[in-house]
Amino acid sequence: MRLLAVGWLLWCSLSLAAPPAPKATSDKAAVKSVTVPNPNGRKGGTEHQAKVKEVEADIKARGLNVRKEHMVPMPEGTKSKRFVDVVGVDPSTGDVKEMHQVGRQTKDAQPVARERKALDDIQKATGDRPEFHPYKPK
Amino acid sequence: MRERCPVAALDYRSEKPAPSLLSTLSVAEFGKTWLTIILAPPDSLGSLAFEHVPRQGYWTVDLLRSPAMELSRCFYDGKILRVGRLFYDRGFYDEAGNWVEKPASFQAWAKKVFSVARKGLQRDAALYSYVGENAQAERKQRGLTLVSL
């Protein structure tokens, strides 16, 4: 009974993460900010979402559970934490078995700089480099 | 949880595209029971979308497009306690690329679930987690390790 209580009380740990909704952009702001690096934040856009879904389906097909926006603490990084787009976890232990990052790539098929930085940070913190899945924005 | 907020708990896997309700939120057997389950407002079960996982032979709730929340329950083996989490999407992009916000009633329910879950827990900044009294006690007295990954 006690063990269950321990588990129960920790349920809402970690990210309690409802990702922020994309912010509505006022006309004024739209005029001012010509280059918004990623207006939808961690969520990405339609194409990002579609690629994430594709990765998720593959993970599920291999018998793992999917966890989106998995937080990785960065005790020594410039950012305090990073979010892996999708991880595959062991369904019965919750142990992360694989990590996947979805993002844009350069013309020579390399992740764009911000994605490379994220991959580097996550690798430094976890010892594993997420698999990168490029998508093509419209 | 259920005393303070109406919650329907669903098994992550269903044999058909319909909710497979659970009578309890507890983990039956650590190491065997799937830790992830689905929470939904009881009056929204008819609005759930399902997706098929043919290679594994099950159906599961399409969390992106459904008024539902993922609950990854903690794993415990006497030595480690791996943190769990609650997670939901507030909306999604439809096929035309338009942002679709999930119903306000669902979002209010989800916030309530988070609020109820947080009650009585202490924030642990190092773990980015909320930790309960029993877990803290086990940590201090028996050296239980809390694992955030």
Image: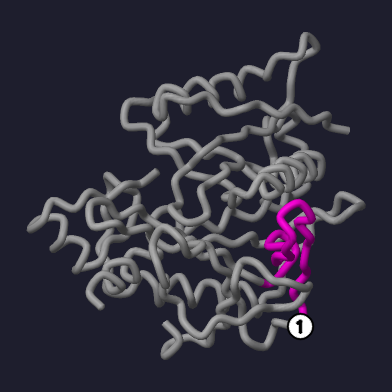
- In the rendered image, which quarter contains the C terminus of chain A? top right
Does B61 lie within the magenta span? yes
Task: Decide: is A96 above or below A113.
Answer: below
Q: Residue furthest bottom?
A: B3
* Image location of residue B43, percent across then percent down: 67, 88
On the image, numbered disc 1 is attached to which residue?
Answer: B46
Q: In this picture, is B143 found above or below A76?
A: below
In the visual, does B146 lie left or right of B149? left
Which residue is drawn at the image coordinates 41% and 75% (left, top)? B26
The quadrant holding residue B74 is bottom left
- Mark 1 crowdedness (10 Å alpha carbons): few <14, some 14-19, many ≥20: few
In the image shown, does B54 or B94 lie closer to the viewer?
B54
Mark 1 lies on a secondary structure that is: helix
- Farthest residue toward the top? A108
Q: Position of residue B94 (x, y in %)?
A: 85, 56
Does the segment drawn in magenta span residue B73? Answer: no
User: Residue visible at 40% across and 43% down?
Assistant: B149
Which of B24/B62 is in front? B24
User: Which residues fall within the magenta stretch?
Assistant: B46-67
Q: Amino acid at mark 1?
A: Gly
Left or right: where B40 falls relative to A125: right
Of the pair B111 and A100, the residue shown nearer to us: A100
Residue A28 seen = no
